[in-house]
Image (cartoon, coloured by chain):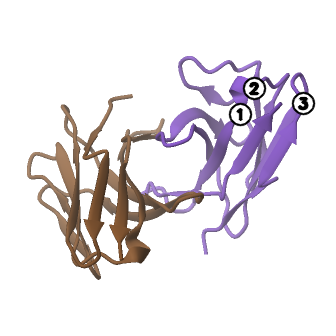
């Protein structure tokens, strides 16, 4: 399937600082999903974005879908140590043969 | 709701043996389940899509005779790694889609199985 490019690969912040990870595609996305994987754990679904320009918030997390539906971002305000983990975006293929293609992820570490 | 379990959570085996991993949707029916493999510090790579009552669809480069998938019911899919070798050591994760939520396209992930082949 079509790849999604995710940057940065790693991000280390001080607790209280903000964090953003970006997901980009060369082709239009039917939808984009975000997952969080804690160290040693499994991916946990965070959100799905479908509409052009969509913005969704979950407490300190803000998810955006670009107007052209080719990019997305996840922003965390005032990071906490509990935010540590790898954040993956994943594009859905849509249609009857549905599957997800994951980006390489951004590993976030937070210094207390 | 939407809980997916995997068994075993970890397994160590000798080279040449076969290992079976179970994936169960506990509180929903899943006509489609997915099997992923994740190497350390890497992303999830889809291996195959498991369809209830029919043959699995394998991704390019994944040997179907080595990674046998059976989806015998709406709540159970199994992955058997046949004649395992050290290079098969990895974190195997399954996911499932809720049969009655086709519009959501959300996949619920199991806790994963860590396989170490000696």
Report the side of A112 relative to B93 (left or right).
left
Element at label 1 = loop
Establish if A111 lies above or below A96: below
Residue drawn at point x = 60 percent, y = 53 percent = B96
Q: CA distance from mark 2 to mark 3?
A: 9 Å
The disc, 1 or 3, on the residue closer to the chain's N-terminal end is 3
Residue A49 lies in quadrant: bottom left
Element at label 3 = loop
* Circle 1 Cα neighbour tier, 10 Å, few/some/many (<14 / 14–19 / ≥20): some
The answer for which chain carries disc 3 is B
Please identify the residue farthest to the bottom as the structure is shown: A59
Which chain's colour is purple? B
Which chain's colour is brown? A
Residue drawn at point x = 81 percent, y = 25 percent = B84
Residue A103 image point, x, y percent: 36, 41
Q: CA distance from mark 2 to mark 1?
A: 5 Å
Residue B79 image point, x, y percent: 76, 38
Same chain check for tags 2 and 1: yes
Q: CA distance from mark 1 to mark 3?
A: 11 Å
* Circle 3 Cα neighbour tier, 10 Å, few/some/many (<14 / 14–19 / ≥20): some
Residue A77 image point, x, y percent: 21, 75
In the picture of the structure, the residue carrying the numbered disc 3 is B14
The disc, 2 or 3, on the residue closer to the chain's N-terminal end is 3
Element at label 2 = helix
In the picture of the structure, the residue carrying the numbered disc 2 is B86
Q: Is label 2 in contact with label 1 (beta carbons under 8 Å)? A: yes
Note whether residue B32 is visible: no
In the picture of the structure, the residue carrying the numbered disc 1 is B89
The answer for which chain carries disc 2 is B
Between residues B80 and B75, which one lies in front from this camera angle?
B80
Same chain check for tags 2 and 3: yes
């Amino acid at each position: 399937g079509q790849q999604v490019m995710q940057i940065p690969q790693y991000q280390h912040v001080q607790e209280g600082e903000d964090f953003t990870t970006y997901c980009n595609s060369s082709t239009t996305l039917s939808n984009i999903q975000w997952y969080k994987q804690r160290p040693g754990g499994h991916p946990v679904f965070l959100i799905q974005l479908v509409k052009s320009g969509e913005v969704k918030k979950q407490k300190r997390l803000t998810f955006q879908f670009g107007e052209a539906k080719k990019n997305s971002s996840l922003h965390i305000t005032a990071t906490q140590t509990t935010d540590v983990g790898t954040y993956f975006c994943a594009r859905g293929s849509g249609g009857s043969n549905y599957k997800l293609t994951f980006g390489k992820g951004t590993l976030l570490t937070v210094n207390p | 709701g939407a809980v997916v379990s995997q068994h075993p959570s970890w397994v160590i085996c000798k080279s040449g043996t076969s290992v079976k991993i179970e994936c169960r949707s506990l509180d929903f029916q899943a006509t489609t389940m997915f099997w992923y493999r994740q190497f350390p510090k890497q992303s999830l790579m889809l291996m195959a899509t498991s369809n209830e009552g029919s043959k699995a669809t394998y991704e390019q480069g994944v040997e179907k005779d080595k990674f046998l998938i059976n989806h015998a019911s709406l709540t159970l899919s199994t992955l058997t790694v046949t004649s395992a070798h050290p290079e098969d050591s990895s974190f195997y994760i399954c996911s499932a889609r809720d049969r009655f939520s086709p519009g959501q396209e959300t996949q619920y992930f199991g806790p994963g199985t860590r396989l170490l082949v000696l």
